[in-house]
Image: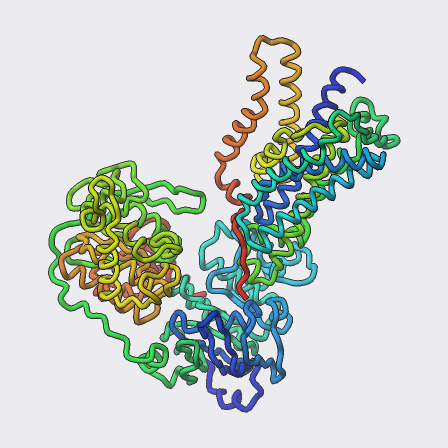
Amino acid sequence: MDMTQAIILTIMTAATPLLLAAIGELVVERSGVLNLGVEGMMVMGAVTAFAVAQLTGSAGLGAIAGLLAGMVFSVLFGFLTLTLVANQVATGLALTILGLGLSGMIGESFIGLPGLKLATIEIPLLSDIPFFGRLLFDQDPIFYTSIVAVVGVNWFLFKSRAGLRLRAIGDSHSSAHALGVKVVRARYLAVMFGGACAGLAGAHLSIVYTPQWVENMTAGRGWIALALVVFASWRPSRALAGAYLFGAVSIGQLHAQALGLGISSQFLSALPYLATIAVLVIISLNRRMTLINTPASLGKSFVPER
Amino acid sequence: MSSGGDVKDQETKTPLLETRGLTKIFGSLRACDGIDLAIAPGEVHALLGENGAGKSTLVKMLFGVLDPSGGQILWKGKPVSIGSPGQARATGIGMVFQHFSLFEALTVAENIALALDGNVPIDRISEEARRLSLEYGLPLDPSAHVADLSVGERQRIEIVRALLQNPELIILDEPTSVLTPQEADKLFETLAKLKAEGRSVLYISHRLEEVQRICDRATVLRHGKVTGACDPRQETPSSLARMMVGGEVAQISGAGLGKPGKLLIEVKDLSAPARSPFAVTLSGINLSVQAGEVVAIAGVAGNGQSELFDVLSGEDLVSDAEAIRISGQAVGRKGITERRLMGCGFVPEERHGHAAVTEMPLTANLVLSRHTSDRSAFLSGGPMGLINTEAVAMAAKRICGVMDVRKSGDDPAAGSLSGGNLQKFIVGRELDRQPIVLVVNQPTWGVDAGAASRIRQALIDLAKSGSAVVVISQDLDEVFEIASRIAVINEGRLSAPQPAASMTRERIGLLMGGFHDGTGEADAEALHAH
């Protein structure tokens, strides 16, 4: 493996959790729900995956447990905001704070332990393709999942009837209700999908990216995933591009620091965030496209009249 | 168009749909109270009533959106329970909603697909929708985004969507309230076609003339109860109105509008770019209003009414300060508070959230709009600006008295008032100041006849007392009732205001559709030929 391949590989590893969490949140927001608890669900996924991998000795079980932990957390969010109709922004923030605290408590005894790493799966023949084969077809299962999720969600949203209903709910939940679409049920499913993705994204951090447990190890990636959804104007393919762009900038700045370019390291560390802001500004210039894609009932609570 | 005459036949048949004692209770309000209704196969049945009479509640129960609290629904003589819109559709009931249940971000075909059960591919729906829409004379482009369509086109989507399910009964909730007279004529042709095919139509309206023109029978509701069932063609508009309102509606009197005086509002060559992709660009607007006259601006919704209101009120500033003059002063760059201080009053279209904060009580809403213009009356404590609750409560009471605002409790939340009563309060709040200039957008939208006539009379009285009044309205009856001069807004352009006496519905209808005098004759004929 040469230098270029190694750099691309690290970019892919950095981008995968962002992509997964963003795709999950994209589906949630397309249904009109704003879950700001991505960071909390991710960190719960990370600690659960690490702990289960330690206790069972199987990183695979850890990944599944991480996914489930994110999902359980999202059901809590769904219960509060969809059943009890609590404010979505406040509940999401509370979920993040709860997740960061709870994961710190659960993970205390795991700090410093060497972790298990999820094995890569080599796809025969395809992995023999020169240059790209090793990069794309000799990867961990979470990477494959993230790519499948992009394709699958894109198909679901824009080709399937259920996806059409989901977009309709996000555009106008009361109209959807009047047509007989089950708004709350669909939103629960969307929120749970988002939770599962965030949980798996967290698991990726603690059993693939850096196989260990460190408190607050998500380090704001949940927030970046949220920004990526807006950045992607709620389109899965753009979320893929955004996540990899962000991954590239954040890895690039590490290399730039190593090369000693004479630019302050603080500025370089801030680069990915500056890039996000710049792209968000550029995207919001085309207001018609933004309005067509933005779920109009995003963040609004729904109480059916009966 | 009319093909009645078989009324006797229908009475002997089993009704297609019948309700017996249908009741819906919200808290302590009996929105529908023991409704008996029978719709025969192949008839156009009118459901008449004022706003808040229970019409929408009734049809929501028929369409499975609301659960009845009591009573029975019979379909072809058999009791049925309609638990969801899906069940209603399966039964054979289609519905065209008053406030469209369309999704702006989706395409026409996607909107239609959402209302269909089963798994027909989107492409097939597009084809089918195109075919049906042409057959009924309602042309549609399935791949267009709803956000880019006019209100009339949006209604076509609703109708085609309902027709695709091949319903035996189609419910139309206030379908013409958003259409030009010409668009309405086309809709009536479609309804005649449906009737000829043996389908029944339940037609909800409060427009008597329309009901008399197209409906075979009518059921009248008031305060949630049936007050009459009749053949509308045997009735006079005033006898129908009595059933609806339960008493004579006060006649509006424009007598006493004297000679126009001083020029108070002067708009010259005003243009304003659209603020959002879905907003309208205002271009080359000229308008002058003198003291003592009411100028009405007619037009179909979404043609720049709210944009025009916003620049007149100062909610949106225009780049050229000279483009708008009030009492001779250039105010184009002055905000709403400055204009209020000059003696202007403004009533925006949307009651909830724009003209009033629904969660706050009436007194708080009063202070919110008049804290600067009536500072000395409502605030005390000098620079501290403490609210003088007593003075505010007095003023609120005065307004409610003058405008006959009916409310529960002394100072209820604005949102707890019915639409008509809240509107009376909001208009009264401005009138109470005796503004020299008043601009009102859709003053009686969704307001019942009693409240509407009160509001209209108050606007005329204000003009009589020497103020300049601009009324932006979609309601042609209202326009003719109160205006001294009439202008029409279409796609952000305003026609020159003409004396009301010289305007006809026909001419306004053409202006609404963008056909201008002289040049539009040929187009107008083409429109009628369809």
Residue toward you, B131 or B24:
B24
Residue A154 vertical position relative to residue B110 in the rendered view, above or below: above
Residue A266 vertical position relative to residue B388 in the rendered view, above or below: above
Q: How is the image coloured?
A: rainbow
Residue toward you, B391 or B42:
B391
* Image x and y of residue B496, in percent: 25, 53
Residue ID at (66%, 57%): B124
Residue A154 picture quarter: top right
Q: Name the image quarter holding the C terminus of chain B.
A: bottom left
Residue B423 vertical position relative to residue B345 in the rendered view, above or below: below
Residue ID at (54%, 91%): B12
Residue A39 picture quarter: top right
* Image x and y of residue B447, in percent: 35, 66
Q: Quick check: A216 left or right of B265?
A: right
**Residue B350 seen from this side:** yes
Residue B58 vertical position relative to residue A273 in the rendered view, above or below: below
* Image x and y of residue B93, in percent: 58, 72
Q: Report the number of numbered marks.
A: 0
